[in-house]
Image (spheres, grey):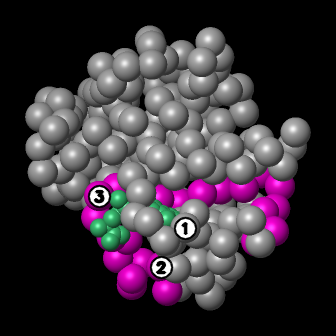
Amino acid sequence: MRTFIIRARKGTTRWELVRSQIGSREHFEVVTHSVINAFFFSNGFRDDVEVYIILDSSIDFPRTIKLSSSEGLSIGGFHEDAVLELVETALKNSMGLQKNETRMIAPGLHISGFGFEKLVGQLLITRPVYLLDRKGNDIRSAEIGSDPVFVLSDHLAMPKNSIKGLMRVGLKTISLGKKMLFASQCVVLLHYELDRLLA
Ligand SMILES: C[S@@+](CC[C@H](N)C(=O)[O-])C[C@H]1O[C@@H](n2cnc3c(N)ncnc32)[C@H](O)[C@@H]1O
């Protein structure tokens, strides 16, 4: 299993506003591009991938949408609109969601009433978790454990205070070089590096 966490710092939890965040200062296209690159390759769909989208912009608490190909996720195409539809569907069907509740929306599509620290803290209990960071350990010299989880931010920097505590409980950093890349480009390179290791 390969898991990607995309933290959308300005990602809205209001379904009717999601589309307006494409091509705007919220840059929700970072999320849609990352999702497409996480699951699709030419003529194929990876069946061992999970993507968590964390939507931080909320009046009450963040929402986390989980997309999981091994649980029967269906995406209507490898275009932006198909990903937007999934996000809108999850949000529309989560009216009344309580803090910390998780709701199944469709096969491979869940939404939860929690955010970054709780999700990463939970995953760290059982899985190796890596924060993508230009200043981290080079991916080719780092040892990547099995069923890795990779954590990325959108166009905004990951807040340092949310990382500090997680580093103490095992979060590691890895780098894909000195150039600042888009999150979606990191996803492609991570697949490339892991596919090479498995080849
Ligand atoms: C567009 S960057 C974020 C830019 C933001 N202004 C900042 O200063 O962090 C999106 C995310 O991709 C990851 N990333 C970008 N370039 C990377 C690199 N060379 N190595 C590892 N991760 C990288 C980081 O997780 C980063 O937070």
Local secondary structure at mark 2 = helix
Local secondary structure at mark 1 = loop
Position of 62 compared to 52: left or right? Answer: left
Q: Amino acid at mark 1?
A: Gly
Q: Estimate how packed mark 2 is, as few (under 14), some (14 to 19) or many (20 or more) residues with alpha carbons within 10 Å.
A: some
Q: Which mark is residue 163?
A: 2
Q: Is mark 3 within 8 Å of ligand 1?
A: yes
Of the pair 23 and 93, the residue shown nearer to us = 23
Q: Residue at x 60, y 57 (%)?
A: 150
- Is 39 magenta? The answer is no
Q: Are marks 2 and 1 in contact (CB under 8 Å)?
A: no
Image height of 90 relative to 162, above or below: above
Q: Residue at x 81, y 62 (%)?
A: 145
Q: Which mark is residue 148?
A: none
Q: Estimate how packed mark 3 is, as few (under 14), some (14 to 19) or many (20 or more) residues with alpha carbons within 10 Å.
A: many
Name the residue that disc number 1 marks. Answer: 177
Of the pair 177 and 78, the residue shown nearer to us = 177
Picture coordinates of residue 91, whole percent (x, y): 30, 33
Q: Amino acid at mark 2?
A: Ile
The answer to which of marks 2 and 1 sits earlier in the sequence is: 2
Q: Which mark is residue 155?
A: 3
Q: Is mark 1 within 8 Å of ligand 1?
A: yes
Image height of 163 relative to 27, above or below: below
Q: Is mark 2 within 8 Å of ligand 1?
A: no
